[in-house]
Image (cartoon, rainbow, N blue to C red):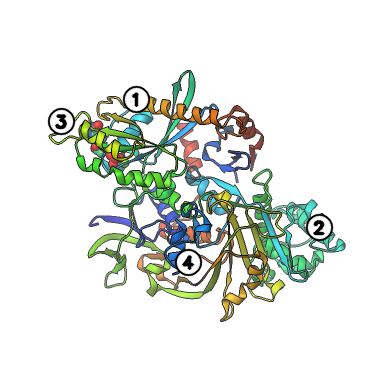
Amino acid sequence: MSQEYCLVASGLQYDTLNNNYRQKNGRRLTMATGAPTYKIILCGEYGVGKSSLFRRFMNDTFSMEKGKKSTIGLDQASQSFQVGGEEVKLTLWDTGGMERMSFIGQSYYRGANAALLCYSINNKETFSILSQYILDIVMNAEGAKIFLCGNFADCEAEDRVNDADIENFTRECGNVLSGSYQVSCKDGTSVKDMFADMARVLHRENAKKMTLRKDLVIQPGVTPEDDDIHKKKCCTSS
Amino acid sequence: MDEEYDIIVLGTGLTECVLSGLMSVGGRKVLHMDRNKYYGGESASLTPLDEVYKLYKMGDKAPEHLGRGRDWNVDLIPKFIMARGKLVKLLIHTGVTRYLEFKSIEGSYVYKGQKDAIYKVPSDEKEALSTSLMGIFEKRRFRNLVVFIHGFDKNDPRTWKELDPQKTTTKEMFEKFGVDANTQDIAGHALALYRNEDYKNASMVEFIERVKLYFESLTFFRDSKSPYLYPLYGLGELPQGFARLSAIYGGTYMLDKEGCNIVYDDDGKVIGVESGGEVAKCKQVICDPSYAADKTKKTGQVIRALCILNHPVANTKDALSTQIIIPQNQVNRRHDIYVSVVSYTHQIASKGFYLAICSTTVETDNPEKELEPAIRLLGSIEQKFITIKDMYEPVENSEKSGVFISKSYDATSHFETTCDDVLDIYAKVMGEPFDFKKDERLEQQQQQDEM
Ligand SMILES: Nc1nc2c(ncn2[C@@H]2O[C@H](COP(=O)(O)OP(=O)(O)O)[C@@H](O)[C@H]2O)c(=O)[nH]1
Ligand SMILES: [Mg+2]
């Protein structure tokens, strides 16, 4: 078998098969840094602009193409952010359009640090259904922070989702929300700021947790010592 | 629904999901439906634990002492992944690895009838010499066989030890090395993972390749003690990963669909699939046996006992996961019995609990008794759930109708036969065998073009 790959320990007794480490042209692709990485999943109704957010996040573009065509073959992208002088990585996951006529399946939620709940400001239905999504997130991605994102801010409509609606919703959810944003994927308004803010909130939260658990030595994926474990356990075979 | 598709896939078991993914990546327009409202069919992992009690008609609620129901993801079919097997090749080739996290199984054991005990399967020449499975002289003979297998290269006659690979059967090879019946059982059933004795009269080359796969899988991780991997959160993650792959390459998913009846024209060729009065048109259908009962035949039965334990299995060094093989000859049977154990470290049970699944191919009309040698090894059991399932495979030439039917999941302890089925159906549907190297070549081509 010519394909070489490397298995990496992702915690003390963890072995992870990770495609990022596949050998390519004799040069191994390694993670650029040991920067902390947070997984964010996109949730919300079909058509509210999740894939458009994904596209903005990935390469800051926009397409009027609907549905699958705009993100074929892609559902995962990473970007680096600076939080108080530290590098932080966000990995954004798109649904792959599975929500169109079906369910997403639990495996999408595994290990998510945050969920970005999307709705269309123009379409109250896409907003009022969000409590159901919150239930799914709480069930399947324990401990994930939930953020709210109203898209289509560029559009004018008569019956828009307004501040009072959002306030009510936040209260009903018992303050599980860690942030609320309004953006337009079409003209790009506030999209970058939103992700930067999420990076900040997630990293602060994590830093808090880490100081609480300082006496626990192991912090998989975070501490520099962990990087050494990666190197040691890394092996290739052909 | 009124759209037209190249292929409609029915059922979201692992076989169907892998095929759906490969077809979508290959540019086919795929509609994938399931009667259930969850992914995975028989290869789903049930959650919360209440669902398991409901399925086995044992009430609506799991007992409280089993912990939080949501921490459970209970497989119905016990299988492990050979670290160097075909499923890993498919996972890496398609990039589905990025959705999953694996742990290696901590131990691999084999049962010896004479001593009524389990022993660690020797994982290299050194362990072959130190094992207490065999007597002192037998150990040396076994080691010589292992060394021969390691060195064997079917293209290099110097490594053949005067055994013609074309003509020599495994039995003849065993005779040459003088290994006894017990050692043959360990080599054939615990290393080559054959389920019955047919292999002895087949070519030694296949045997050697299977043992090599075992050893290569073992060395896949630096410190692994078994050749197997297991995905965190249960096997149900596998079909979901491939379903995602299919979706991001344009596949459409519909769950919870009633009916899903295949519609044929007057010549018996498939024209579509009906659900809720609507027909989605297509040229081909891929499905599990339950969607095309008229084109399948029963091939036997498999019995599985799902056992919840609150302790590791005795004599496995408190392993949090393990496989135990009971070779048929050791208990006077015609098929091996398998035990696979996983636990809370794999996110499939709540803290402190283990899930052991015993399984075998049914031989008598008292199948539960057939599993006794395995159940005995487990010690005290919190709860046992028994399933006896008919196994089906397509009747001959059923694919002439354009309907390609997968086989039921057999009693083997790993996914190699499932992958054979996937690759076989792929070749029939696409008209050419699956090419693991194709993407690499394309990549190289593109890089050359860029230069
Ligand atoms: N005017 C406007 N159109 C948008 C915006 N965001 C997305 N769209 C369009 O809305 C449609 C659905 O978006 P998509 O990202 O596919 O939604 P998804 O189903 O949630 O992934 C596409 O045609 C997009 O071009 C926005 O902010 N403003
Ligand atoms: Mg989308």
What's the amino acid at mark 2? Asn
What's the amino acid at mark 4? Lys
Task: Confirm or reject: label 1 Cβ below 8 Å from ligand 1.
Answer: no
Q: Residues within 10 Å of mark 4 (few under 14, many from 20)?
A: some
Q: Nearer the viewer, residue B150 or B297?
A: B297
Tell me whether marks 1 and 2 sit on the same chain. no
Return the residue at label 3: A156
Q: Is residue A60 left or right of residue B90?
A: left
Which residue is outermost to the right? Answer: B137
Q: Is residue A154 left or right of residue B169?
A: left
Give the spatial CA distance, label 3 vs label 2.
80 Å
Residue A6 position by quadrant = top right
Give the spatial CA distance, label 3 vs label 1.
22 Å
Instruction: Answer whether residue A148 is visible to the viewer in this image.
Output: yes
- Residue B334 in the image: x percent, y percent? 64, 75
Cβ–Cβ under 8 Å for marks 3 and 2? no
Tell me whether marks 4 and 1 sit on the same chain. no
Return the residue at label 4: B407
Which circle's residue, 4 or 2, is located before the other in the chain?
Answer: 2
Return the residue at label 1: A192
Give the spatial CA distance, label 1 vs label 2.
65 Å
Residue depth check, mark 1 versus mark 2: number of the one nearer the observer: 1
Task: Confirm or reject: label 4 Cβ below 8 Å from ligand 2.
Answer: no
Label 1: element kind? helix
What's the amino acid at mark 1? Lys
Q: Nearer the viewer, residue A74 or B267?
A: A74
Question: In the picture shown, does residue A3 fall above or below B207?
Answer: above
Give the spatial CA distance, label 4 vs label 2.
38 Å
Q: Residue at x 47, y 36 (%)?
A: B445
Instruction: Pinpoint the chain carrying mark 1.
Output: A
What's the amino acid at mark 3? Glu
Return the residue at label 2: B144
